[in-house]
Image (tube, helix red, strand yellow):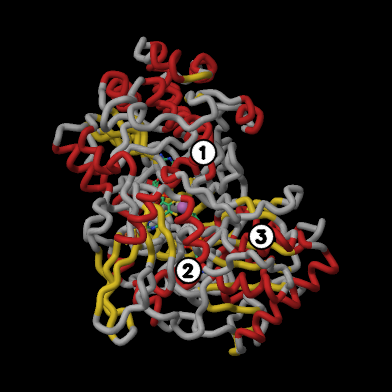
């Protein structure tokens, strides 16, 4: 293993942030401080090029918002006044609160709260999982992201490895569906541009005119939440037009007849009307998909975050099976590649399977309403719920409960950290080891510390390990440190992968990093078949599998609000860095109807809350839809409320995922001179 660096050197590591690319990094260190962050060539996919925000990660490490030592609350909850204490004192208070809640209300009154999208394999699901399992704490359904798409990918294909970036240039048709790689995974962009230069037709399905939508041959600017009818209409076109690959369907799939029956009602004209797109554009897309190979569906996450998101993702990802698009390089689908390494954790204890499960999307509701038992201790780490979870006002109200003990374990003073009773400082990825899997690029890399922990920051494995000991829950054979966990994982990997990680910091990707679906890789479902229909999903979805829930619409809140990822943050991470103010985006027709002009101060509101900010008026978003970025901090708006103040905590049709792109709002111009606070 690498040792701590000395002065004036470069440390090879990897970016673990919640981005598909997993860039390999070269970090310049001088006198124990990070002085530069650049790309390296260890990951051939990212090949030396990284995004602007991670270049600035040093500003997080040494910036004024960094948490440097444990603290306890001094003023009222939520105000952010703290005083410094020792680790011993802080962890003593946490242990005491946990013991008291456990004794009076039972283990389920303790709620661990974490998402961990920006964490590798060593900074989550290690001693934290052990601690909460042994406490009998409530379990957390981690639903903020990727649950509908993950469930669809798992049901259909058992999460078969995806088409990799390097094979996009082989495609002759690319459907980029609910995905904006210019912001969210920038190394995909040159691969798509190369495909276009090679003659590929690019179709983008997105309510916004994203950079690639502007360069596409066809842009279907669908109304948010209408992807299901669009995808089903393409299925219908394939089946009815004799373009379905019947030989493939009978050899490799189950349930095709039932999918066909459910798609039957969605003619191209009906779907086009529902989605608000020109019928001839949708017909062209269906015809192109029926007749082109290699054809690639790149499915993103934008379409999963609404009431129809699970079924939409099922219908989209089922397209290559019905169209017979597998078996050629550049053909098939691309979704998450995170399951491609076959890594399972051996000591992630399941604990008592009857423990209550809390859906993390409904945090506010749970804190305010759960009684059996109520949540008495909330332990938030690897997550910033005040910024990222729906129904922000209720999340904040829940955190203000005087009888709730809140622990926030964080790197910086986030909007959530302000609500802590005890605040614990965490290391960043440049201060510890991790193992990082790309979910776009097929890569598995070793994250190495570039510097010593800053201030008194400690890593997750260490802190949860100490809590296990303080609470008398540790066992003799526990491996509680992050290096132990890494050795454990390395021991599970085939020797060549483990050797790559040890020797070069990166495992050699299987299939040369370029698997061809149905040639090199096959469905990982129990029977090896593609499951186009599934009875349990049919029972779970409110309108059945492939059943559509139309928006009845309200005249009071006629605009759909979507909240795409921005290039400035990863979810809310790095939101503390200085930058120009954030603006909502609104179509000129919607703005004109409300007397709003570019640059005006506006108020977006609905019964859940209201947000004040400035507006950009431009045709970058379809009429009837407004866009305000995800991941904003209270400092980014004029009244401190952010996008999630407008987002309901309703759940997706499949998997119980968050419905971030399913809010409805009204927007009005704020007359100049109006007071901004107390809204
Ligand atoms: N810079 C940056 N990179 C990121 C992130 C980040 O916050 N910042 N987040 C990371 C994470 S956690 C994730 S999950 C991924 C997400 O990666 P993406 O899926 O690419 O990102 P999103 O912006 O969530 O959604 C993509 C697009 O979906 C569109 N969209 C919204 N609603 C709908 C709809 O109903 N139908 C369709 N077809 N499209 C819709 C949006 O306009 C947006 O352009 O990105 C990761 N990478
Ligand atoms: N409005 C709206 N909101 C959204 C979305 C949307 O589309 N619209 N998208 C959602 C999506 S896709 C996702 S994935 C979620 C993500 O939501 P979150 O899981 O809340 O992700 P982040 O905002 O990145 O916050 C992660 C926090 O963990 C901290 N952290 C990182 N590493 C460590 C560590 O090792 N130890 C500890 N203790 N802390 C650490 C970071 O400092 C950071 O503050 O956001 C969702 N929020
Ligand atoms: S956030 Fe994505 S693009 Fe930026 S350095 Fe990390 S992996 Fe690379
Ligand atoms: Mo995400």
The C terminus sits in image quarter: bottom right
**Residue at (60%, 56%) from the top-left corner?**
347
**Residue in the picture at 14% in, 35% down:** 198
Residue on which the image places disc 3? 364
* Quadrant position of residue 126: bottom right
Q: Position of residue 607 (x, y in %)?
A: 62, 55
Residue 140 appears in which quarter of the rendering? bottom right
Q: Nearer the viewer, residue 409 or 656?
A: 409
Report which residue position mark 2 lands on. Answer: 633
Residue 551: horizontal and vertical position, in percent? 55, 36
Determine whether 279 is above or below 297 in the image.
above
Q: At numbered mark 2, what does the secondary structure look like: helix, strand or loop?
A: loop
Q: Residues within 10 Å of mark 1 (few under 14, many from 20)?
A: many
Q: CA distance from mark 3 to mark 1?
A: 22 Å
**Label 1: which residue?**
309
Separation of marks 1 and 2 at Cα, in angstroms = 26 Å
Mark 2 or mark 3, earlier in chain: 3
Quarter of the image with the N terminus in it: bottom left
Query: Does any atom of ligand 1 lie closer than 8 Å to the CB of label 1?
Result: yes
């Amino acid at each position: 293993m690498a040792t701590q660096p000395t002065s004036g050197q470069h440390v090879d590591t990897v970016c673990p942030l919640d981005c598909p690319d997993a860039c390999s990094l070269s970090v310049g260190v001088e006198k124990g401080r990070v002085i530069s962050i650049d790309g390296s060539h260890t990951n051939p996919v990212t090949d030396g090029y990284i995004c602007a925000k991670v270049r600035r990660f040093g500003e997080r490490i040494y910036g004024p918002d960094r948490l440097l030592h444990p603290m306890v609350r001094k003023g009222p909850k939520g105000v952010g006044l703290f005083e410094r204490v020792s680790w011993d004192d802080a962890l003593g208070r946490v242990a005491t609160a946990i013991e008291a809640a456990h004794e009076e209300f039972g283990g389920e009154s303790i709620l661990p709260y974490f998402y961990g999208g920006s964490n590798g394999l060593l900074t989550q699901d290690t001693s934290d999982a052990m601690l909460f399992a042994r406490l009998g704490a409530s379990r957390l359904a981690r639903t903020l992201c990727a649950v509908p798409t993950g469930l669809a990918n798992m049901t259909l294909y058992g999460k078969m490895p995806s088409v990799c970036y390097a094979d996009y240039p082989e495609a002759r048709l690319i459907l980029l569906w609910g995905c904006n790689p210019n912001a969210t995974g920038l190394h995909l962009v040159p691969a798509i541009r190369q495909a276009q230069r090679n003659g590929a037709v690019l179709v983008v399905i997105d309510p916004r005119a994203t950079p690639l939508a502007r360069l596409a041959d066809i842009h279907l600017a669908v109304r948010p939440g209408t992807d299901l009818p669009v995808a089903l209409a393409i299925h219908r076109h394939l089946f009815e037009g004799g373009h379905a690959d019947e030989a493939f369907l009978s050899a490799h799939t189950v349930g095709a007849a039932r999918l066909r029956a459910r798609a039957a009602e969605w003619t191209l004209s009906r779907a086009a009307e529902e989605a608000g797109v020109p019928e001839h554009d949708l017909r062209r897309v269906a015809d192109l998909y029926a007749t082109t190979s290699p054809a690639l569906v790149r499915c993103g996450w934008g379409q999963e975050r609404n009431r129809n998101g699970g079924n939409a993702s099922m219908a989209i990802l089922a397209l290559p099976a019905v169209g017979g698009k597998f078996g050629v390089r550049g053909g098939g689908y691309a979704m998450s590649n995170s399951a491609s390494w076959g890594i399972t954790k051996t000591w992630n204890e399941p604990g008592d399977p009857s423990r209550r499960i809390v859906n993390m999307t409904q945090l506010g509701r749970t804190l305010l309403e759960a009684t059996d038992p109520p949540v008495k201790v909330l332990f938030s780490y690897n997550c910033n719920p005040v910024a990222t979870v729906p129904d922000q006002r209720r999340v904040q109200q829940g955190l203000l409960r005087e009888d709730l003990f809140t622990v926030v374990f964080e790197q910086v003073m986030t909007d959530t950290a302000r609500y802590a009773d005890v605040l614990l400082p965490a290391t960043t990825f440049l201060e510890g080891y991790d193992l990082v899997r790309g979910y776009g690029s097929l890569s598995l890399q070793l994250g190495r510390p570039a510097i010593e922990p800053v201030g008194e920051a400690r890593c997750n494995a260490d802190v949860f390990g100490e809590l296990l000991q303080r609470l008398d829950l540790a066992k003799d054979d526990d491996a509680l440190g992050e290096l132990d966990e890494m050795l454990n994982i390395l021991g599970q990997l085939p020797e060549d992968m483990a050797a790559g990680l040890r020797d070069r910091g990166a495992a050699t990707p299987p299939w040369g990093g370029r698997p061809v679906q149905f040639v090199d890789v096959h469905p990982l479902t129990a029977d090896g078949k593609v499951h186009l229909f599934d009875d349990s999903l049919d029972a779970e979805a409110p309108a059945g599998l492939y059943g559509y829930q139309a928006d009845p619409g309200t005249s009071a809140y006629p605009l759909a609000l979507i909240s795409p990822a921005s290039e400035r943050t990863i979810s809310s991470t790095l939101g503390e860095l200085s930058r120009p103010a954030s603006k909502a985006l609104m179509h000129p027709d919607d703005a004109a109807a409300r007397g709003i002009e570019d640059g005006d101060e506006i108020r977006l509101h609905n019964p859940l809350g209201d947000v004040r900010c400035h507006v950009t008026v431009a045709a970058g978003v379809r009429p009837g839809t407004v866009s305000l970025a995800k991941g904003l901090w209270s400092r980014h708006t004029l009244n401190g409320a952010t996008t999630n103040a407008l987002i309901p905590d309703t759940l997706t049709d499949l998997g119980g995922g968050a419905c971030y792109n399913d809010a409805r709002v009204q927007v009005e111009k704020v007359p100049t001179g109006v007071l901004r606070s107390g809204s």
